[in-house]
Amino acid sequence: MKTFEEKFTAWVDGELTGKELVEFEASLPDRAAAEAEKREMQKLGAFLKQELAAQPFANEEFFSHQIREEIGRDQTAQDRHGTRSTWWTVPRLAWVGATAIALFVLFSVMFVRENAPESQSPYLTQILNARVDPVENPNATIAMFESQKNGDERVTVLWTEGLKSLPAEFAAK
Amino acid sequence: MQIETPPAQTEVSEIELVKRCQRGEAKAFDELVTRYRTRIFGMIYNMVHNEQDAWDLAQDSFLKAWKSIGRFRGKSSFYTWIYRIVMNVTIDHMRKKQIKGGGAEFDDRIQLKEIEPAAKTAPKADELPFERMERGELRQKIDNAIAQLTPEHRAVILMKETEDMQYHEIAEALGCSIGTVMSRLFYARKRLQNLLKDVYENV
């Protein structure tokens, strides 16, 4: 559904035809005023066409020359970029990929080794396996602490309380 | 001044030129520039009323067209297609300048003072092609009247009245509906009628 403005424009430009034209002209409240308005708009159009259409354009060749230069620079840059990218995609990319994988594996192995738990000492095994006889030592407790000092140095502390005697299996061998 | 061939008469070779451009032939594009540079420059000049800006915007439009010509599918004429680029570049420039310029948008004298003489993409200000041209009082009045229209209204009235473009071509160039074009044309004409009535009645 066209608005009045759209229909009026089409009417001025001679784009309304047939039934649409008849209906539009019939709908105009003041046909004479509308016709005058139409002529005014057509006159304005002709005036603008006459005054604005012919624009002299000096230095046309310089204009084209600048565009040619810009396109030339653009193409040179693209060619250079294209050569580089080929060199990157084939051998260098493969080498970079292989090196990256090798480094990743190397660091992974080092990291796993670093964080692997050390083998348990025989003393600790003895302590862990020790049992207190509840009949002979009803209030006895054995606690064990392990702490790490200065990086690799580990210290295990055995805390005993209420023992009448140290169980025979605690004796270090 | 070089006479340009109307697009209708060169349609076949224009398509061929576009195809060659799409294969990367800069010479073919140079031919298209030669054909349309005057019309495009004139259109932009009528929009911005500044020779230096019109020159730069026309160059920018052509370079954008070259970069995106691979996407041109030939559904419209090359001229309509490049017009869309021209309009985007020009209207965008006008909007930015209106914000920055604070009302000094269409003053050529101010612009010429601001131009860097060694600017890369433009000739020196005192060597501008249009600087020596005397602008008559009539032309000045028309320019002032057009300057009071919004960028979109300027675009439709200039494309319709000076370029004889059809509604659908204008709609395509501006990326809007035909109804919008017709509506904008109505208001742009009304406004110019009020502003220029005394001028064109007496010519």
Image (cartoon, coloured by chain):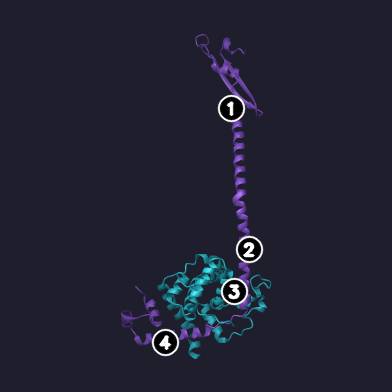
Residue type marked 4: Arg
Answer with the quarter of the image where residue B26 lies: bottom right
Depth check, front residue: B74 or B88: B74
Local packing at callout 3 (Cα closer than 10 Å; few below 14, some 14-19, many 20+) is many
Q: Secondary structure at mark 3?
A: helix
Residue type marked 1: Pro
Residue type marked 3: Asp
Between the residue at mark 1 and the residue at mark 2, the CA separation in whole angstroms equals 60 Å
Q: Which residue is mark 1?
A: A117
Mark 1 touches mark 4? (CB < 8 Å): no
Q: Which residue is mark 2?
A: A76
Q: Look at chain B in the picture and name its colour.
A: cyan
- Identify by letter the chain in purple: A
The chain containing the residue under callout 3 comes to B
- Tell if the residue under mark 1 belongs to the same chain as the one under mark 4: yes
Question: Residue at point 62% right, 49% down?
Answer: A91
Depth check, front residue: B18 or A167: B18
- Tell if the residue under mark 3 belongs to the same chain as the one under mark 4: no
Q: Position of residue A149 (x, y in %)?
A: 65, 27
Q: Residue furthest right?
A: B118
Residue B200 position (above or below residue B157): below
Q: Secondary structure at mark 1?
A: loop
The chain containing the residue under callout 1 comes to A
The answer to whether B132 appears left or right of B185 in the picture is right
Q: Which residue is mark 3?
A: B53
Residue type marked 2: Thr
* Quadrant of the image containing the N terminus of chain B: bottom right
Residue A87 position (above or below residue A22): above
Q: Residue furthest top?
A: A136
Q: Which residue is mark 4?
A: A39
Between the residue at mark 2 and the residue at mark 4, the CA separation in whole angstroms equals 56 Å
